[in-house]
Image: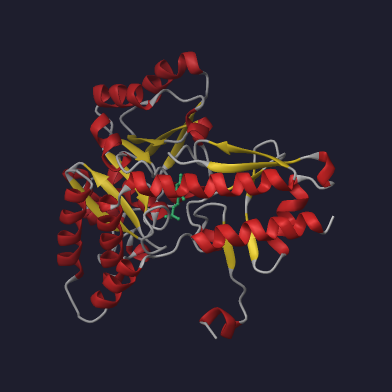
Amino acid sequence: MNIYERLGVRTLVNAADSYTIIGGSRMPAEVIEAMAEAAEAFVYIDDLHDAVGRRLAQLTRNEAAMVTSGAAAALAITAAACMAGADEELGARLPCADVPRDEVILYGCQQNGFVQAVRMTGARVVELADRNAESARELRAAVTARTACLLYFVSPQFERHALPLKEAIAICHELGVPLVVDAAAQLPPVSNLWAYTEMGADLVIFSGGKTLRGPQNTGLIVGRAELVAACRVHSGPRSSIGRPMKVSKEAMAGLLAAVERYVGLDHEALNRQHEQAVVKICAHAGRLGFRAERAYPGPTGQSYSRAALYPEPALGRTAVQLQAELRHGEPSIWVTLSEDGTALLVNPLHLREDEVGLICDRLTKLVDRR
Ligand SMILES: *Cc1c(COP(=O)(O)O)cnc(C)c1O
């Protein structure tokens, strides 16, 4: 019996996305091995942070980098760094916000649950309205001596009404305000690891436990050396606002191995593999009475496709019903729904080949039970 069987906890097939509530992603063998190796010895955690950060900076073509305990932790730590700089004493006042720069600006259309990680540092979040034509003027008007940074979430869903990132960067630089990009789920393409900093973003955040397939409790900050150094000041192992978000030596080794692996992958071959899975699922579903098509891009704008399966009326079940039946079957299969709820979306990102077959077989069974 495996650990989940011994514990009586059911496993599931993830055809949805890298969701924390279902365990994020699967760590490849290289990552697990690096973590086991790191577990063997004691080291000075600061030395390891330095060395891993330098290597991650090289791999991601950035000036500097550091490992955090997740992208959400990185939101808190980058906010602290923008509020207090590298000043440990100012940092010690957080979260009471008794610091000269305590405001984080955010486009209202980008408001989401992760912003709480910023507020926990004591930062006041200043929301900009979402009127396209005025957003440049509005951003300029919102910047004051109290501004710590502009926080910008990249993804088609969040950017709809905000000033385009390039323009926001230009304004922030003109006014001397750092711009922090949350790109937690913006891989692939792999080039996003350096694209936002090349555009001029000061700090960029990625999740380590999503597409990178590092430890689920890791995140990555890349960007300007001075600001990354400030992030370190407000992180573990120091007593600081970031101390409850400490990063273990195993997690650092694991994320480094994951990034090394990810940047070295044959991304074209991987993309072909995803496309083949989508084609196979679409062809199978088409034979079963779905209208099946390739949906592009990925759930938050990533450069891969998914299978969109629209049940025809003759099937007698809606996409919502089929989603629930897939979830409650054995094993449980997680798929998401299209925005309008009329299609099942099958995401190949975390599917092994055997699981693609398993999904096809399950669809056949569900349809036969009609
Ligand atoms: C997933 C996600 C996060 C949180 O990432 P963790 O690594 O799980 O902490 C933050 N911001 C955005 C936009 C995300 O998609």
Q: Reply above or below: 123 against 39.
A: above
Residue 141 in picture, x, y percent from top left: 39, 20
- Left or right for 210, reference 99: right
Residue 60 in picture, x, y percent from top left: 23, 47
Quadrant position of residue 340: top right
**Which residue is rendered at x = 51% and y = 26% of the image?**
160
**Which residue is rendered at x = 32% and y = 44% of the image?**
190
Instruction: Identify the image quadrant of the N terminus.
Output: bottom right
Q: Reply above or below: 115 against 368.
A: above
- Left or right for 161, reference 58: right
* Residue 290 visible (yes or no): yes
**Which residue is rendered at x = 54% and y = 46% of the image?**
278
Residue 69 in picture, x, y percent from top left: 36, 61
Q: Nearer the viewer, residue 234 or 211?
A: 211
Quadrant position of residue 88: bottom left
Chosen colour scheme: secondary structure
Instruction: Identify the image quadrant of the C terminus.
Output: bottom right
**Which residue is rendered at x = 45% and y = 38% of the image?**
125
Residue 304 in picture, x, y percent from top left: 46, 41
* Residue 99 visible (yes or no): no
